[in-house]
Image (cartoon, rainbow, N blue to C red):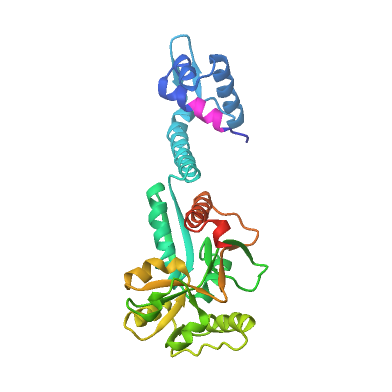
């Protein structure tokens, strides 16, 4: 049985109007084309659906039984197609994004607020997590894409650089470093340094050692989250280093920032997606918006 949507719509239009003339007008087809669609449908079903006369159209018993079923099929299909059109037109959708804790409570939160103003019907679900958890959540499909610092390449992931920014030093108002427009890494040795545990400290040590062989930073405090480090700096327990995307949190703690030089140590951050998998229109839109959002703040020629 080969029944087409055009045939079903034609049958329903005739059944509703009781007239081939009116039905043809509602479907923007000729009466002969409409008549052919009805005949094709009857041949496919193997039963007569309506009796035609010069005065009126009378549905057969099978035709009468078929009307509510066809009506439901058409309505259900129209709802599905409308939903697909809404998603494609970015009127509806859900986007899931994974990001490290610090980035989630600063850059990504600000991005979501800006995106929601442009696309209020698209919901973004932010999954804040540890840095090492971002990639696994992308690979397993728990999120559409993730944002995180540079890591070892993986065949399961596609990575596109979002931005590259240098470290800045963060300290409370009135600190001696406030007198400088730029601060050298060597200058930090005179003050208690608050660092993050693990990969953060190890990477900085490698970068500094490669540039300045005799410079070693010994942390006075090591914590798990940058928000804790900023809180400790705000309490006068030392100074810390972070990436400028955390500016809103630095300001919230009423801290000041200065560029760190000699050497300039940078970190690259990437948008991660599952290799070989396409994104939904909403996720594609959100990712493009994120790149634009970051490029406005840190133009590529300045951040690289």
Q: Give percent across and percent down for residue 103.
A: 45, 68
Quadrant containing the N terminus in the rendered view: top right
Residue 136 is at least partly visible in this image = yes
Q: 183 and 76: which one is in front?
A: 183
Residue at (38%, 81%) from the top-left corner?
A: 176
The answer to whether residue 91 is above or below residue 139 is above
What main secondary structure does the magenta stretch of the protein show?
A: helix
Residue 227 is at least partly visible in this image = no
Looking at the rendering, the stretch of residues picked out in magenta corresponds to: 5-11
Q: Which residue lies furthest to the right in this view?
A: 155
Residue at (44%, 34%) from the top-left corner?
A: 71
Residue at (48%, 12%) from the top-left corner?
A: 53
Q: Residue furthest top?
A: 54
Q: Give percent across and percent down for residue 198.
A: 53, 84
Residue 196 sits inside the magenta stretch: no
> How many numbered marks does the figure carry?
0
Q: Which residue lies furthest to the front in this view?
A: 179
- The picture quadrant where one finds residue 256 is bottom left
Q: Give percent across and percent down for residue 73.
A: 47, 38
Q: Give percent across and percent down for residue 101.
A: 44, 72
Residue 8 sits inside the magenta stretch: yes
Residue at (57%, 84%) from the top-left corner?
A: 205
């Amino acid at each position: 049985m080969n029944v087409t949507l055009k045939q079903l719509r034609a049958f329903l239009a005739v059944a509703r109007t009781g007239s081939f003339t009116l039905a043809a007008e509602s479907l923007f087809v000729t009466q002969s084309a409409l008549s052919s669609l009805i005949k094709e449908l009857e041949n496919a079903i193997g039963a007569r659906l309506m009796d035609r006369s010069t005065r009126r159209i009378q549905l057969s018993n099978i035709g009468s039984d078929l009307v509510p079923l066809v009506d439901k099929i058409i309505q259900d299909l129209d709802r599905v197609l409308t939903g697909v059109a809404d998603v494609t037109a970015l009127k509806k959708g859900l986007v899931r994004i994974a990001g490290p804790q610090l980035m989630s409570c600063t850059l990504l939160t600000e991005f979501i607020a800006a995106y929601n103003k442009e696309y209020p019907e698209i919901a973004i679900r932010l999954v804040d997590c540890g840095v090492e958890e971002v990639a696994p959540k992308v690979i397993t499909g728990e999120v559409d894409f993730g944002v995180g610092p540079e890591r070892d390449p993986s065949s399961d992931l596609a990575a596109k650089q979002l931005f590259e920014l240098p470290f800045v030093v963060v300290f409370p108002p009135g600190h001696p470093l406030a007198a400088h427009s730029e601060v050298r890494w060597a200058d930090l040795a005179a003050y208690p340094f608050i660092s993050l545990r693990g990969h953060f400290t190890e990477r900085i040590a490698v970068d500094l050692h490669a540039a300045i062989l005799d410079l070693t930073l010994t942390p006075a405090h090591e914590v798990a989250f940058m928000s804790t480090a900023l809180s400790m700096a705000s309490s006068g327990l030392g100074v810390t280093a972070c990436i400028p995307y955390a500016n809103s949190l630095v300001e919230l703690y009423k801290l000041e920032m200065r560029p760190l030089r000699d050497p300039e140590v940078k970190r690259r951050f990437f948008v991660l997606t599952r290799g070989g998998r396409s994104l939904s229109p909403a996720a594609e839109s959100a990712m493009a918006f994120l790149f634009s959002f970051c490029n406005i703040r840190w133009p590529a020629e300045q951040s690289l």
